[in-house]
Amino acid sequence: MALPNFGHSITASLVSLSSALQDTGGGQSGGDAPKLDPVQLVVHASIPVKAVLIILVLFSVACWIVIGAKALHLSRARGESDRFLKTFDQATNFDALAQGIAAFRGSPYARIFAVGYDEMNRMTQGREHAKLGEVEASHVESATRRAAAKEVTHLESWMALLGTIGSTSPFIGLFGTVYGIMDAFLSIGNQGNANLPVVAPKIAEALIATAIGLVAAIPAVMAYNYFARKVQYLADNLEGFALDVAARAKLGGV
């Protein structure tokens, strides 16, 4: 009696295995396997990951706005400054140069000159080509150097935002990544199933947060370094120009 039972058991096992293989093959050939769509992953992401993605997208938009505005600002300042410096070197006196200064409103050099010219006239009470004493000359020099420092601060405006975006975006994206992976492990523990359909969506949305964090950070860091070099170059020249204006003001603006 044992042999027939044993043969029946083997036959039943083979039938079950054959049915399972047929089901597996039919599922794969029918294309029923779920496909991961990045857009759907973002739409159905958890609330913390969505918050991280929204913050990073806003950072990225703000970064490119600042990059565009700062590029135009520095381009205009450099272009008008080159033209003003040529006019400054060719001018015979400050009075003639001051008459056409309105054409160089975008130049920080022109604004420094305007401060020095006004202080020179105030010290000399409007007397033409009057030389300044040591005290008056020191006052004009102090005024022009303060104006130069103010112009450097103006040139650096909004650069702090680029530095903040570049330094914080990777960590914000990393927070989204850590939360997504933690959520994936919690799903494994709650469902008792470590199959890819359970783990893959949450890990994928976590990696999307990392990618967007890098997309926001990399342009911000590159732009910050580029603008910092440009501003430093202008800052060094503005300091020297402030002293030049003060020296010519001491001689009566000639």
Image (tube, rainbow, N blue to C red):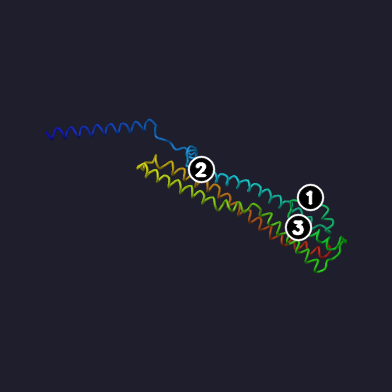
> Among all residues in the image, which is located at the extreme right?
127
Where residue 125 appears, x then y in whole percent? 86, 61
Tally of numbered tags? 3
Q: In percent of the image, x 33 and y 32: which residue is there? A: 25
Residue 204 vs residue 74: left or right? left
**Amino acid beneath label 3:** Ile
Badge 1, how many Cα within 10 Å: few under 14, some, many 20+? few
Q: Earlier in the sequence, mark 3 or mark 1?
A: 1
Residue 70 vs residue 4: left or right? right
Where residue 54 appears, x then y in whole percent? 54, 43
- On screen, residue 194 above or below 224: above
Residue highlighted by disc 3: 112
Q: In percent of the image, x 52 and y 49: which residue is there? A: 172
Q: Earlier in the sequence, mark 2 or mark 1?
A: 2
The kind of secondary structure element at disc 3 is helix
Task: Work out whether residue 104 or residue 79 is closer to the camera in this orientation and state it.
Answer: 104
Task: Work out whether residue 93 or residue 199 is closer to the camera in this orientation and state it.
Answer: 199
Residue highlighted by disc 1: 103
The kind of secondary structure element at disc 2 is helix
Q: In percent of the image, x 52 and y 44: which residue is there? A: 51
The C terminus lies in quadrant: bottom right
Q: Earlier in the sequence, mark 2 or mark 3?
A: 2
Q: CA distance from mark 3 to mark 1?
A: 14 Å
Residue 50 has which mark? 2
